[in-house]
Image: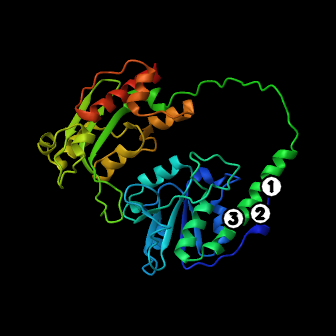
Amino acid sequence: MVVCYCAALPQIETRTRVVILQHPRERDMPIGTARMASLCLPNAELHVGVRWDESPALAAALADLARPPILLYPGPGAKDILREPPAGPVTLVVVDGTWSQAKTVVRDNPILHALPRYAFAAPEPSQYRIRKEPKAEYVSTIEALMYCLGALEGRPDEMRSLLAPLNAMVDAQLAAQAKAPQRFTRQVVKKKPPAPPPLALSSRWTDLVCMVAEANAWPYVGPDVVRTPDELVHLALQRPATGELLELVIAPRGELSPSAHFHTGLSPERLHAGIDRDGALALLRAFLRPTDIIGGWGHYSARLVHESGGWLPEHADWHLDLRAVAQRKLHQRLGSIEQFAASLGPVEQPRAQGRAGRRLAAMTSIAHRWRA
């Protein structure tokens, strides 16, 4: 059924500039509200994507000196925008997607880390009755904008007109469901054939190199925190086909984060006793071959090595995200890499130190299981 809410769209002028960053998986959702909100607000722009650090459009929006940017995202250090709205016009950056998608976008885009953060607690239940939220106090994107713009513009009653198209869509959807005939049919679920193994686990097994990188990382949150780039301090690589191992502990050049030893599993003394970064990157370059495929659990390790100046293969299939492969296979939450590896069977004993060693052992165990 096609539902049109165009007649219910208000036009609301605001001094606030609204920038909506929509996760690609939300773009085609027929009951999404980000597009709806952008149609109601002439001073709003909607961008679709996951990576924003090299986006000219977002960079231009964040450089608006007359309307400094703020990020609507909860977490430690976030101010209550309903109680403490910033003075003067601002650029309000909103991430549209599921909570998991929004978390990924904020985490993986350093350009967002330095923005002052704001959040709020919805004063009333959501009217988005056709989509289940993780918690009762969560609201849709258009409802979040209604509350935030009400505080920023000082016109909360006028901003409630943003609910008109939402209610029109929800009412039409519920009416269509009520009129639809109830069909009770037995559904035969056909078992899908197993997906073929990735190229790196079949014909190019000898090219696979599992890699885990750890960082000296400072907290991202807080409106007064100056974003410090993550610094590579521990690197562990292994070729599952041969067992060949490379482990590098790299001395930090900057001040060591108070939590670095906790996350890496290495003492501050061990980290400071590491080798120079340039020497470590030279050893990495000597270990890797141009035909290698770098296996990772996500993209963080590869990105950290690249941003630290490390050489990585440059061919089209140079990276294999084992976490993404697992998600496509199982369609379920995986937990940590250690938990997922243990769910498949016995895990190899770590051959490298710290958390990187445990994760590398888990990753190579996963690769061996899938190849078998």
Q: Amino acid at mark 1?
A: Ala
Which tag, 1 or 2, sits closer to the chain's start? 2
Q: Amino acid at mark 2?
A: Tyr
Q: Which residue is mark 1?
A: 172
Label 3 near label 2: C-beta < 8 Å? no
Q: Position of residue 295 (x, y in %)?
A: 39, 36
The secondary structure type at the circle numbered 3 is helix
Location of residue 245 by image quarter: top left
Label 2 near label 1: C-beta < 8 Å? yes
Q: Residue at x 76, y 68 (%)?
A: 8
The secondary structure type at the circle numbered 1 is helix
Q: Which residue is mark 3?
A: 163
The secondary structure type at the circle numbered 2 is loop
Q: Is residue 280 left or right of residue 26?
A: left
Q: Position of residue 300 (x, y in %)?
A: 37, 45
Total marks shown come to 3
Label 3 Cα neighbours within 10 Å, binned few <14 / some 14-19 / many ≥20: some
Q: Amino acid at mark 3?
A: Leu
Q: Which residue is mark 2?
A: 5
In space, the residues marked 1 and 2 are separated at their CA atoms by: 9 Å
In this rendering, the label closer to the viewer, 1 or 2? 1
In this rendering, the label closer to the viewer, 2 or 3? 3
Looking at the image, residue 141 lies above or below residue 69:
above
How is this picture coloured? Answer: rainbow
Q: Residue at x 53, y 72 (%)?
A: 151
Location of residue 207 by image quarter: top left
Looking at the image, residue 329 lies above or below residue 137:
above
In space, the residues marked 2 and 3 are separated at their CA atoms by: 11 Å
Residue 108 showing in the rendered view: no
Which tag, 1 or 3, sits closer to the chain's start? 3
Q: Position of residue 311 (x, y in %)?
A: 30, 47
